[in-house]
Image: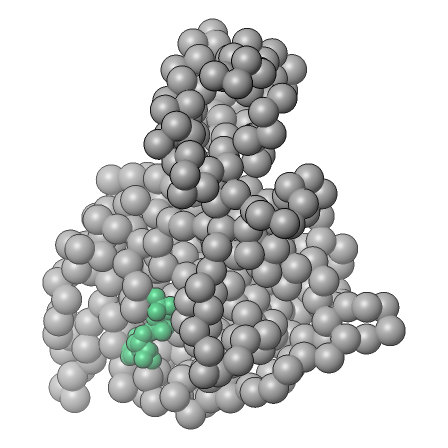
Amino acid sequence: MTNITKEIIENKLGKIILDNKKSLPESNIIEGISHKDGHVQISLYANKENEEEIEKISKIVEKELISIPGMLSVTAVLTNEPSNEKKSSKMQPVNKIEGIKNIIAIASGKGGVGKSTISINIASAFSSIGKKVGILDADIHGPSVPHMLGLKGKPEVNNKKKIIPFEFGDMKVMSIGFLLNDDQPVVWRGPMVHSAIKQMATDTDWGELDILIIDMPPGTGDAQITVSQHLPLDGAIIVSTPQPVALNDAIKAIGMFKKVNIDIIGIIENMSYLLLGDGTKENIFGENGAKEMSKRLNIKFINEIPLDKKIRESSDNGIPFVIACPESPTKDIFISSAKAIEKILN
Ligand SMILES: Nc1ncnc2c1ncn2[C@@H]1O[C@H](COP(=O)(O)OP(=O)(O)OP(=O)(O)O)[C@@H](O)[C@H]1O
Ligand SMILES: [Mg+2]
């Protein structure tokens, strides 16, 4: 623990005077500041015209804040400036979403490693052990949860002015995919990503949930910043394949969550091996990569999930594998993963 307070940080920022002769806080370019135990993350608004200038300011901010005695790390990030949208109230972090006990994000550095597959199957595993589950698909660039759960249509709004989530079995489902038109590509700007994700999280009528699982887009962009800085996240699960490229990107994603003080619940290695007819395992993408990485980074290794044609097929048929193939031993891996996650959360 350190004694660094919000006031100390604001005081320091107030002493940074910009070319407009105003102090940094007066210049309305701070989107948000989060700090915990000597680690600070600050995001600054930038647009195409002033990006270079804001980049320079961000370096000054980092230098000034790290000079505060006891400060351990400072990260200044640039975020797209909202145009007509108001900067103030929309950008406030949400402290609690009524009725939801735990919120976790399923994230990865590299795309296509199986985040969505793991999200819907871990969700189904939680549901099958009697938990009330919600799935929030925050993949703004390629929402795949609707397809993987065979859900279609536009959500309706109830008399409490809340979005009625879709349902799969007992699970509540909300996806950015329900809000977009299939055939229109969307060009997302930072603030749009922010308000879309925040609205889905807070304006959906989830009811009582034991756990809300957020399926993230790959990488470390605007969606990650919104989820980690503005939603009451209990932790993130990092999915990786055993390949070195995926592992390197996973390390970057872990670094990003750690910087904003989000706990890493653990690592799930996906596509770890192919189970052959004679019971032997073929390590197509390499061996033990994520396991060794988790040891090195002192992060819990939750499980390895095999490459299984039925996992792909069931997703394409709109039914999570855990529900479609209840007899499979791989189903038990998902169930034990859910139990391990539950244990860590408690
Ligand atoms: N263990 C597995 N066995 C077989 N197929 C799998 C497995 N995991 C994922 N897949 C398949 O791999 C493809 C990519 O998986 P998925 O869409 O879940 O990845 P993602 O990380 O969410 O991708 P994106 O980064 O695009 O969101 C899908 O077709 C999925 O069915
Ligand atoms: Mg996905």
Seen at 55% across and 70% down, the residue is 176
The mark total stands at 0
Seen at 71% across and 43% down, the residue is 89
- In this view, the residue farthest toward the right is 159
Q: How is the image coloured?
A: one colour
Percent x, y for residue 300? 37, 48
Determine whether, in the image, residue 304 is placed left or right of residue 170. Answer: left
* Residue placed most toward the observer, 291 or 48: 48
Seen at 76% across and 55% down, the residue is 98
Seen at 49% across and 26% down, the residue is 40
Determine whether, in the image, residue 340 is placed left or right of residue 229. Answer: left
In terms of image quadrants, where is residue 88? Answer: top right
Q: Vertically, is 318 above or below 280?
A: below
Determine whether, in the image, residue 235 is placed left or right of residue 240. Answer: right
- In this view, the residue farthest toward the bottom is 317
Q: Quadrant of the N terminus?
A: top right
Percent x, y for residue 310? 32, 87
Percent x, y for residue 334? 42, 71
Kindly tell me whether residue 266 is visible in this rendering: no
* Residue placed most toward the observer, 15 or 160: 15
Kindly tell me whether residue 279 is visible in this rendering: yes
* Residue placed most toward the observer, 45 or 216: 45
Percent x, y for residue 248? 21, 49
Determine whether, in the image, residue 282 is placed left or right of residue 270. Answer: left
Q: Vertically, is 273 above or below 194?
A: below
